[in-house]
Amino acid sequence: MQNEIFELQYAMDTFYFLVSGALVMWMAAGFAMLEAGLVRAKNTTEILTKNVALFAIACTMYLICGYEIMYDGGYFLSGVTTVAQMDDAAVAAILEASNEAGFADMGEYAGASDFFFQVVFVATAMSIVSGAVAERMKLWAFLTFAIVMTGLIYPMEGSWTWNGDSVFGIYALDYSDYAGSGIVHLAGAAAALAGVLLLGPRKGKYGADGSVHPIPGANLPLATLGTFILWMGWFGFNGGSTLKLGGIGVANEVANVFLNTNAAAAGGLIGALIVARILFGKADLSMVLNGALAGLVAITADPASPGPLMSTIVGLVGGVIVVFSILFFDKIKIDDPVGALSVHGTVGIFGVMVVCVTGGASVGGQLVGLLTIFVWVFVTSLITWFIIKAIMGIRVSEEEEYEGVDLAECGMEAYPEFVSQN
Amino acid sequence: MKMINAIIKPFKLDDVREALSEIGVQGITVTEVKGFGRQKGHTELYRGAEYVVDFLPKLKVEVVVKDSALEQTIETISKAANTGKIGDGKIFVSTIEEAIRIRTGETGDDAI
């Protein structure tokens, strides 16, 4: 009878990883729609192409070497049990391990589901970069960077944090980050920052006298849809990071994670809404959308420990921070079309540090972890972007930027009209 | 009174607008158009099939000015919209018979 329960537990926890992974995969659609809505019509096809392609590259590179670097899962996933390999002997071995460990432990689950859950996080981290460099980066330069980021840069810092490896054998981290405010979001923002610094702002964004010219997005319905999709996907992002469902304590934790994630998003949205109203006199939808996402990023480092009210407040503070951060980046002439650096970077840092208050993490441990992640990702990204720039260039020409990268890079308009049949 | 129809490259709008307000032109109408002159279009590929895109996005700027301001306005627009590359656009001039301000009923030069 006990074996049957262990089989059920295996199935339930595997199922949970799979469904959570599918939800996080859905976030890729969220990013695509959000970014497509916030760029100009003439640059829409290109950013969509970037988003779908980076997802595919992330999945493939992580399969080839990323998972091995991060979790010793074997190059080309050689460590994952295939269907053929799950024979009676393998099942018996799993049941034996379960019986030995009892129900208190992490428990057994399918290796393939672990990879599936992890790989979608890689894609999320990479996807943060595409928004910040939108409208002026060469498509193939971006995809080349994606190969390096998903195959090496992210897996390395992931191995030091979630896999507990020591950093180049020098020191180990004492760092708490439940679902990745630092590991995923700050990392993505650091890579994006390196790219944006080398890339420069869009033409016409900043005046010589220091004025900031708005470049409005072409499709706010898409941007809103994207935000809601990300919100829903985040239930998998944070919820799945509990890593287990079968058990009263852990199921309760999962429920609270969902609840807190939602509360933080709501708090972030309200925070940004109020700040925008105060600063600009009107609600600014684009800020409000960023606010909801900021709330989500803020709670991601610890969505389990705080109560629902505290989670709302954490989100709210994130939503307030993000508005000021966006204004700040424009002030120092760092052009970020979708606010990615602020949502994922600035608020990512906040999210990591707030665990000292909500989850009892040590300030030193969080700071060292943050700095390790940031320095590693930023420096290696900068070097990578630099090499790519030297080989193929990273910015489109001035003509191409005016014409729109849809035509220049993709040869395909997102909203075509006047097409003559020839 | 003369009507100036200027077809310009879209990213030149701000330059043209600023230049016009500097010489005292107070009102303009802008339309998004597609067109071509001697600037050729290009071929694109969609799911394996080639097609020709002749029409390029441009902006049509319409300004109505007093006869005395015509030369200066034409020169201002020309300079502001010029990039030296093909596709800069064209300016057409026609005569306006009458202009009326709807709010006050003023006519002629007072309405411009």
Image (cartoon, rainbow, N blue to C red):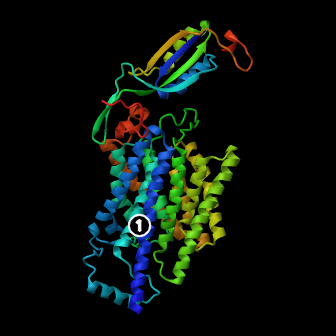
Image coordinates for residue A31, horizontal then vertical, percent: 47, 53
Helix or strand or loop: what does disc 1 sit on? helix
* In the image, farthest residue toward the left: A84
* Left or right: B9 in relation to A315: left
**Label 1 amino acid?**
Gly
- Residue A259, picture quadrant: bottom right
Tell which of A320 and A227 is nearer to you: A227
Image coordinates for residue A377, horizontal then vertical, percent: 42, 58
Q: Residue at x 51, y 68 (%)?
A: A238
Relative to A159, say whether B25 is above or below: above
Tell which of B39 and A186 is nearer to you: B39
Tell which of A358 and A49 is nearer to you: A49
The quadrant in which the C terminus of chain B is found is: top right
Relative to A295, say whether A138 is above or below: above
Q: Is residue A9 in view from this perspective?
A: yes
Relative to A361, say whether A419 is above or below: above
* Left or right: B57 in relation to B27: left
Q: Is residue A171 in view from this perspective?
A: no
Which residue in the protein does label 1 denote?
A: A158
- Residue B96, picture quadrant: top right
Label 1: chain letter: A
Image coordinates for residue A295, horizontal then vertical, percent: 58, 60
Q: Which residue is drawn at 43% across and 22% down?
A: B83
The quadrant in which the N terminus of chain B is found is: top right
Tell which of B29 and B86 is nearer to you: B29
* Left or right: B27 in relation to A199: right
